[in-house]
Amino acid sequence: MIRHASFLSALIAVAAVSVVCAAESPSGLDQQGQPDLKFAGPMAFGPDGILFVGDPLSAAVFAIDTGDRSAADAGAINVPAVNQQVAAVLGSSPDQVLINDLVVNPLSGTAYLSASRGRGPDATPVILRIGGDGKVAVLSLDKVHYAKAPLPNAPDASAKDRRGNSQRQESITDVAYVDGRVVVAGLSNEEFSSNLRTIPFPFTPTDTGTSVEIFHGSHGKLETHAPVRTFVSYTINDQPHLLAAYTCTPLVKVPLVDLKPGKKVRGTTVAELGNRNRPLDIIVYEKGGKDYLLIANSARGVMKVAAEQLGDADGITSPVPDKAGVGYETIENLKNVQQLDKLNDKEAIVLIEASPGVINLQTVPLP
Amino acid sequence: MRVISNRRNGAQIDSPGRSPGTVVLPPRGSRCLIVLLGLSSATAWATEPPAPAVVLATDTEGRRVFEVRGLDSNEVPPIDEIGHRFAAYAVFDAQVTAPPPLAGHYSVDDGSIRFTPRFPLQPGMRYRAVYRDAGEESDQTVLSKEFVIPARVVSAAARVAAIYPTTSTLPENQLKFYIQFTAPMSRGGAYEHLRLLDAEGQPVDLPFLELAEELWNPAGDRLTLLLDPGRVKQGLKPREEVGPVLAEGRRFTLVVDRRWPDAAGQPLAGELRKAFRVAAADDTCPKPRAWRLNIPRAGSRLPLVVDFGEPLDYALLQRMLWIVDRRGEPVPGSIEVGEEETSWRFLPQQPWRPAKYRLVADTLLEDLAGNSIARKFELDARQAGNGTAEQETASVEFQVRE
């Protein structure tokens, strides 16, 4: 006796949170259903619980209604070996799960991870939610309100090699939402170029956004294209800026107003983070009436920079000794930080590689 | 609490043909739980009356699902309790404290509960399905059963097909390598499997730009490996502190480690070493007007051969050069990149006509040091222009003769 056919339809789901596809979805999300996300990469929260997800495989940014608009503060979130917890929920092994980004919904204080189930090109994209109880749940994207913005000037998918394969792909290194615009940093796997694009939100089909190339530095007399690794928005002298950390370590400020179509923007280098620094993530916070930047590095610990110096920094115009430009302090006890986001006014949340193959999600006080 | 765990190493519970085994639990009240080992989901029901059993089955859509079968109708838990009573867990070596169950959803039938995992069960993985009856904690009966999903059929191990540039002499300011594999690779650990050795065989400290995203092509079989631009560009702190990665006159070896798993989890067929010598830095742009063209005769379908006089970027050569006719229409044909990427061949689909053509280059086309036709990799700030757009293409006209 085999009984297959008469099971009732789904009644209850576990380890998954469904987004209620409510009528009162935030404006700007014109599609409903399952977004065709191919890779869940860098993320950023916008207004009303809207999660922006960079998808380099689709060459697009998705805006997804998480439905997470509760104002309740989730409190500290600590999940030891979070990568193993994620693997368990996904029915996979820890070595087959990659965590790509960590962000906090500023409305609810809930943490979100973007991840890949599998490590090959056919890996499944997943977004997970972790609240104050430390429980890991899959964010169900089966039926959500969403919008999709193809990346302007995205690689030409028809550009194929002689074997008929498309080879070019632009990775997305960071995504941010600033004053009604989604800012996306990208890096090509072929020509050496860095693009910073701004796309107005709500997305409009005809708007191709702005592609901006950035020259950095004036290190001695030479400057060139450089890939932006991570950036954050910050207001300097009443003017919104992007503070961008480059893969080759300078920290640069760029007025947001300068990001215009076709324009080559010259960022002002305000600090050199020095050798062995691999900037990974950057946040801005306030403590004791002063603003600070916190920059996660793979090698040197976390760096704290007093933001008040940034307005005065004229830029580095000649080769400089260590800690040139604005000063910074290294928080030595925060080593091996892979991802960083602000949890609340007093705490940050970090992904730390505690030992090989073990990644902890940890709440730490803002230094 | 009574627990039956019928774990058997390597047991593939729902495959028919194994020797059946039966474990009979002590009765709780009038109930007797029987766990059948090694029976197919079909044959598991041969014993009457059916006893509760946890099985791995396949639903009508071909998905693997976990089921508890053989419950009396009145024993099927209320909806809000199902998640507490029946769950499936991934079993792996790491010590997970209070492991969470697999994500998925439940459905019920008369006397059965089905759990459908949200994601397909992973080949080679072990899973445990656990059902707890409604007894008090101290008197609870637990059915616990492990299932092993057969590993994928092993295909031939991937290997490195090529490392570009293929030339064995590279400029001191060499910017990047492309590592082409014969099959898709696993991502997320690339830099653990790549080393740059100096002439003494000692690893160079942090020579690469390590991007967590890793720069793969869409098929996942080609990695772009950038040398740390902070140590390539002049005047940046990393270079000031520890010097450039490569030094003129010295020899290095790029090593691709054999342990790098492909997308199927198998290590590479073998290690690959690319030895090279370092020449002076290249700070000049490729100049299309200096390229030598070998122009075929009209009426033939022989290739147009373009000799650059230096190696150019392998990947960009695939798509940044093309031929147009005198009206500017692209001429259909195929291309080949020549030996050591110093030349490029265009084979037309139709015979050449006696006419003027143009070889067009995207000005983003780069040499090995990232100098493009449009601009040097490192540009003097005073020559950097005022933000005006550069020409997107450069072209060279040529005449095909009778």
Image (spheres, coloured by chain):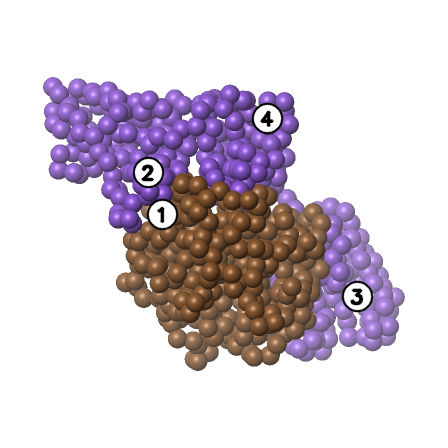
Chain colours: A brown, B purple
Residue sitting at x 73%, y 75%: B75
Residue B93 placement (x, y as % from top left): 74, 50
Q: Chain of mark 2?
A: B
Q: Chain of mark 1?
A: A
Q: Is residue A66 left or right of residue B115?
A: left
Query: Mark 1 Cα within 10 Å, few/some/many (few <14, many 20+)?
Result: some
| Circle nearer the N terminus (4, 2) | 4
Work out how far the residue at label 3 is from the one at label 4, CA to CA, in angstroms: 60 Å
Q: Report, in whole angstroms, how far the alpha carbon at label 3 lies from the one at label 2.
A: 71 Å
Residue A42 x %, y %: 50, 57
The residue located at (35%, 53%) in the rendering is: A265
Callout 4 environment at 10 Å: few (<14), some (14 to 19), or many (20+)?
Answer: some
Q: Secondary structure at mark 1?
A: loop
What crowding class fits label 2: few (fewer than 14 Cα within 10 Å), some (14-19), or many (20 or more)?
Answer: many
Which chain is home to disc 4?
Answer: B
- The residue singled out by tag 1 in the image is A155
Name above or below for residue A99 compared with residue A110. Answer: above
Marks 4,2: beta carbons within 8 A: no
Horizontal arrangement in the rendering, residue A220 relative to residue B391 (left or right): right
* Image depth: mark 3 or mark 2 in front: 2
Q: Which amino acid, mark 3?
A: Val
Name which of mark 3 and mark 2 comes first in the sequence.
Answer: 3
